[in-house]
Image (tube, coloured by chain):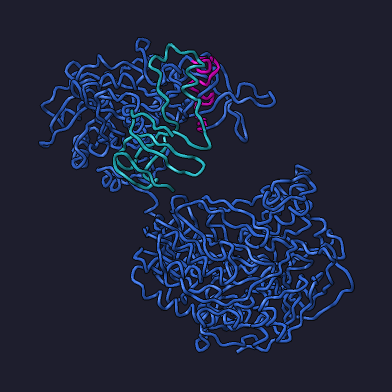
Amino acid sequence: MFIINCPYCGERDQSEFSCGGEAHIVRPKQPTELSDDEWAEYLFMRKNIKGVQFERWNHAHGCRKWFNMVRDTSNDKIHAVYKMGEKPPLI
Amino acid sequence: MTKYRINKTRFVDQTKTVSFTFDGKKYHGFEGDTLASALLSNGIHLVGRSFKYHRPRGIMSCGSEEPNAICQINDDTNLTEPNVRATEIELYEGLKASSQNCWPNLNFDIGGINNLISPFIPAGFYYKTFMWPKSFWKKIYEPLIRLSAGLGKSPSQPDPDIYDHKHEHCDVLVIGGGISGIISAKIAAKNNLKTILIEDKNILGGSTIYQNNKNFIIDNKKSNEWLMNEISELEKLDNLILKTRTSLAAFHSYNYLLAKENISDHLPLDKKNGDIRQRLWKIRADKVIVAAGAIERPLIFNNNDRPGIILANSVKKYLDFYGVTTGLNNIIFTNNDSAYETAVSLFEKGISVKIVDIRKKSSSKIVKNAEELGIEIYWNSTVVNTFGYKKIKSIEIMNLSEDGSNVTGNKNRIQCDCLSISGGWTPMVHMHTQSGGKLDFRERDQAFVPNEKSENHINVGSCNGDFELEEIVKNTNNKVKKFLNINESGFDKISILCSKELEKKNIWLLPNTISEGKTKSFIDFQNDSTAKDIKLALREGFKSIEHVKRYTTTGMATDQGKLSNMHALGIIADTAGVKMGTLGTTTFRPPFTPLTFGAIVGRSVGKFFDVVRKTSIHEWHVQNNAKFENVGQWKRPWYYPINNENLHEAVQRESKAARDSAGILDASTLGKIDIQGSDASEFLNRVYTNAWSKLGIGKCRYGLMLNEDGMVYDDGVTTRLGENHYLMTTTTGGAANVLSKLEDYLQTEWPELDVYLTSVTDHYSTASICGPNSKKILKKLFPNKDFSDEAFPHMSYQDAIIDKIECRIMRISFTGELSYEINIESKYGKSLWENCIKAGEEYKITPYGTETMHLLRAEKGFIIVGQDTDGTMTPIDLQMDWIVSKKKYDFIGKRSLYRSDTIREDRKQLVGLLTDDPNEILEEGAQIVSELDKKPVEMIGHVTSSYFSPNLNKSIALAVVKGGKKMKGQKLFVPMENKNINVTVSDFIFLDKENKRINA
């Protein structure tokens, strides 16, 4: 169980957080303009990387804020946390 | 004193006798004994039968690696515990232990016949045999397998003991209280680091604490005396927590560790009562030092499993720690020097001992010591067979060929009553790998050792592959100093003299004169897998170590292969001609030793299992005989039986009353979210399928919420309280998830929206009054209010005051009746409810529970999200097209409603079902078919809700059926176990389609 540095609250136990899957998938502004394939790409297709992955996390049992996190899924090393809307760091 | 208790030691108090029973017979041991040492002191080796062949088995080790001596402890129905290792449990007065896996008893076990037919039950026997004939499976094979499966008996009554959880934080956690752990803890604690040292035994010191051999000297003292002194100094340190009887269960990432402390397991029965039995420590450590030690390996030869065959270092521990000899006529069979320490110890106590060594010579100090004492040593020899059914009586040895692959010369038979075996040492790398660490194979020691990359944990001592005293002490000191950034320690100038092993030899499977197929060379003693089984698996094409493990069950017993895994790997590597290092190991998973369920669960049992949420009206429900239903964490009244009514009778009465006069429901549990902000209307437009901008202040509207995939997620009525202020209701079970989902969109997709969400579920209590007389009751409660349809129409809300308390009245309906919901601050909920009951008395107002609510809404054809939907239903499938806005440009899930899959016409769609026999009630979940004779039977749908409607006097059901929209009037079938029920597809609104009642 890892320790996550919530950008609003500081270091807390993983048990306070929930993971919201891959980060930086933007909801299309005009879904009706998209083909089935394009919509499916947004809706269903997610990466499952062994290695450095950009993820959304929610401090569910804390400040309830969503934020982004860069985690190496092979060893759970957390490279960065940053607020929603901020640019992802270069890893 | 028995003839096997030959030595006085400081660890066993021979003035304090402890009595216990084994298989019903009474024995005596002493305080400080384990069950195993006490049994051995009584000359008892045979303690169990093996799992598959039911071969007699004896105590084989002195620790957690024990494969054979697993016992049933206690015979009470609530406290009995199976699979307890006799080598670990401390003896206490009144201990009752019995052997497992034998019938009718340990000495005469019918299952022993498996041993005779063993040539016919090789690895994979079950998979191969029980495949055919198919009809035998249910009646013959399965009951037989179940009968022979499992070890021991589980308790049949609830566990009365208390278990505890505790969190702890420290700078340094040291795992293991042997010599390297003690050195590590002392360095850390002396440098002002908050240190915890955990040790699974009751006494610190590991194997050095009983090492009084003159060849092992530290600072001119025997190593045990030196260590004893260190321990007494350690115990004086302030910032050190010493936890004995505490074993590490799991080492998770980020140095999060679980350790189990035995608090009362070792106490006599009369002192156990009421106290905490075990505590699970949840430790977060800045740095972890693993000093878990090593396990001695057995040797693999024919019939290496007889009672009386024991690991050599365990024999030494029984002798030097417990004062018990495991035999009076010993042979030691070894491939390394460490077993010679056992030989010297035995010899010094005047006990007969001989040595068989597979090596040609050894020139170390300890071997010279043994030779000087005159101990007979058979060099370059191996054991090829053993004799004695319930206890070893003799062995046969032969010489090894030059390359060790074969045996030569004549067989030499030697009598003995105990055979000590030593195949070298396996570092306990479990902790290291559990934390994510990798391993390297070290050819010199034929062992996997940690490949250390982590900055936050290190391995020291023999678990790191340091086996000799000098390297253990010096490497530990240097490593710990570097790890903790310390320049000097009290161990820098230490002087050590010890024996050093120069000649090494290892043969994973020792050669024999007879063919392998006819030998029984056990690798996994508990699961009875042999070298033959491993080779069979390889011949049958299994290559991966993980597959061989599962096919042969090697390493899958309660000891998790602590003794067997290395040999399995070695034999695979030798047979397949590959290097051990390339083979890898099986995965080491927590827990390291079995944990009790009690320790895992801790205090979260009974009423502490989960949070219970009660509404403010709960007490009234209890007083009025309500039966409750769990809805999420909520306790909701299910029905209110009168005069011993059953569920059906009560629901029929409640439903009738609600339609004929008045009913009242506690609706407080519905989720409530307060939504405020200048973009609140726009927000609702985006999250609900219908339009919200034009909803007037004071009006209510039903909304359906989808997932982005177009499937119905939640529903509820939202009320516009003000220009920028709404109150959303959600389903009871969905409240928390809906709030999270809405927050997610607000924070991540639409941060530009000015909207604030607050959960107010617990803030308000809700009494929902329905029925033709509800208006009259409301009038009595609020005499000053105009309840005319013009002033207070359906789907509107008004503020009101009752007993000087503000409340909100919504005229909304989930039953299809004229209906009002009164929301009031929770602390006044019960008083409001009682006022409603009082006002409704003259109309026989009837409290009803969730079951009646479900029935009433089903009559009206209202869905329940989660009952009539299952995450695969779109609003179109539910025939709720009317609620999906065509005009709105976008809302969550809109685009998915016309994906190729969601526009299919043969999707499951919501329909009503009427049974041909109006008294036949369908089972919810029952499958629906259109053709009875078609094979295979095509299931076209299932029943989602089903009731007997007292208001319509017939059975009604909701169902989802493929292409159901176009099937109205069609005959279908619901096949049950004994009959087929004929049904007709109908409209799913069974009652008052014209909404006359709601608008009454």
Q: Quadrant of residue B820?
A: top left
Compared to B840, does B548 lie above or below? below
Can you see residue B23? no
Can you see residue B933? yes
Q: Position of residue B938 (x, y in %)?
A: 63, 24
Q: How many discs appear?
A: 0
Q: Which chain is assigned cyan?
A: A
Q: Which residues are magenta?
A: B899-924
Residue drawn at 60 percent across, 51 percent down: B587
Q: Which chain is assigned blue?
A: B
Q: Is residue B910 magenta?
A: yes
Left or right: B551 in relation to A9: right
Q: Nearer the viewer, residue B738 or B856?
A: B738
Q: Position of residue B393 (x, y in %)?
A: 78, 78
Main structural element of the magenta stretch: helix, strand or loop? loop
User: Which quadrant of the rendered structure holds the N terminus of chain B?
Assistant: bottom right
Q: Nearer the viewer, residue B347 or B987?
A: B347
User: Which quadrant of the rendered structure holds the C terminus of chain B?
Assistant: top left
Residue drawn at 48 percent across, 73 percent down: B204
Left or right: B907 in relation to B816: right
Q: Position of residue B834 (x, y in %)?
A: 20, 40
Residue drawn at 41 percent across, 55 percent down: B605
Residue drawn at 76 percent across, 79 percent down: B377
Q: Quadrant of residue B869?
A: top left
Q: Is residue B236 magenta?
A: no
Q: Quadrant of residue B865?
A: top left
Q: Position of residue B638 (x, y in %)?
A: 37, 40
Compared to B106, does B972 lie above or below? above
